[in-house]
Image: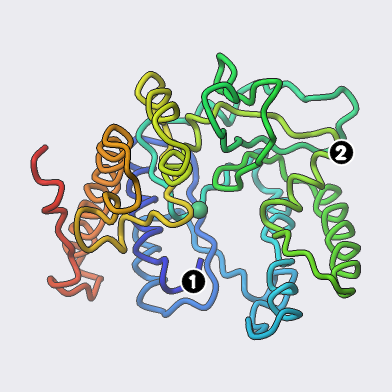
Amino acid sequence: MGEAYADVALTAITSVRAVGTTHDLVVLVWNLRKALVQRLSMVATSVEHISQTFPCPHNVERRGEMNKNQYLMCSKIPLLLRLTQYSRVLFLDSDVVLTENIDYLFTAALTPSTSNSSFWIAGTHNPKNAQEIAADGTPAKSAELRFNGGLMLLEPTEEAAVAFDTFLTRKRRENEVAPWTSRRADQELTSEFFESQGGIRWLGCELNWGVWNMGLRGRELAEWAERHPPKVLHFSGNFKPWLAKDELAWSHLVKDRKVRSLGRRFACVWHRFHEQAMLSIAQNPLSSLQADEVTNASLCSSK
Ligand SMILES: [Mn+2]
């Protein structure tokens, strides 16, 4: 996570603490100002600087197709697989908030999709409609498997890390030849690697509910989310509550009233955690947070 997402990550962390996790909380950062690292250190178990160890030059300029595609081929997965001091790692994007404790994932028995899986990852899909969701929230048989990288559960081993590195190196070499693909390492290539190992274990999509995906797809998914309240809200894509100036930037994007009001409700969950995060940082004597940096969630004030 870079500079622009420091306070977004703080919000995510605040929510993880609020639901009472008993696990370590490691924040992965690169190119972050000292003051912001210090701010994150106040709430995290540890802050890991990944700029040196990231298995790809993160300073590649994003100018030009070639560089852009090289940039997209970077991945944090090998780094996660090398956190071998932990038996399981639950990766969360910084643009998520938890509304329920999901610590059970660290001990859950997860069924592999085939019996010959050497390495596995557990994750969720982005459903297109309610038919693509099975009764337990995992993809229905007919679902197009759009793996979403916002929440991933892994068991770190050096062996898996090396295998993933090798796979990425091969993909990068293929990618040097036009026409370049823009399949991103952190999501599409991750699922391709683990799929080829037979090892994607699907979790229910209430564990990584794409609010923007819901907005794009419409009412059916909103109704599903009302029946199965999301445990993790993921503000991926074009719906970022922290960028919202008015009406939570939602009303002009989504026509359906029901979807709109649910999206606003979810955005307000984010805003309340954000407010809580900023207030607790401001109260910390070590922080240099200015009062005017504490945004207010006034758009959400009717609780
Ligand atoms: Mn995300």
Which residue matches tag 1?
A: 2
Q: Callout 2: 10 Å neighbours few (<14), some, many (20+)?
A: some
Determine the image quadrant of residue 240. bottom left
Q: Residue at horizontal 56%, vertical 34%?
A: 128
Secondary structure under the numbered disc 1 in the rendered image: loop
Q: Residue at horizontal 76%, vertical 53%?
A: 189
Determine the image quadrant of residue 10. bottom left
Left or right: where does residue 8 sit relative to residue 109? Answer: left
| Residue 58 pos. (x, y %) | 65, 77
Secondary structure under the numbered disc 2 in the rendered image: loop
| Residue 20 pos. (x, y %) | 36, 35
Marks 1/2: CA–CA distance: 31 Å
Placement of 44 over or under 49, stated as above or below: above
Left or right: where does residue 254 sit relative to residue 62? Answer: left
Determine the image quadrant of residue 274. bottom left
Q: Residue furthest front?
A: 255
Q: Which mark is residue 197?
A: 2
Q: Residue at horizontal 61%, vertical 42%?
A: 152
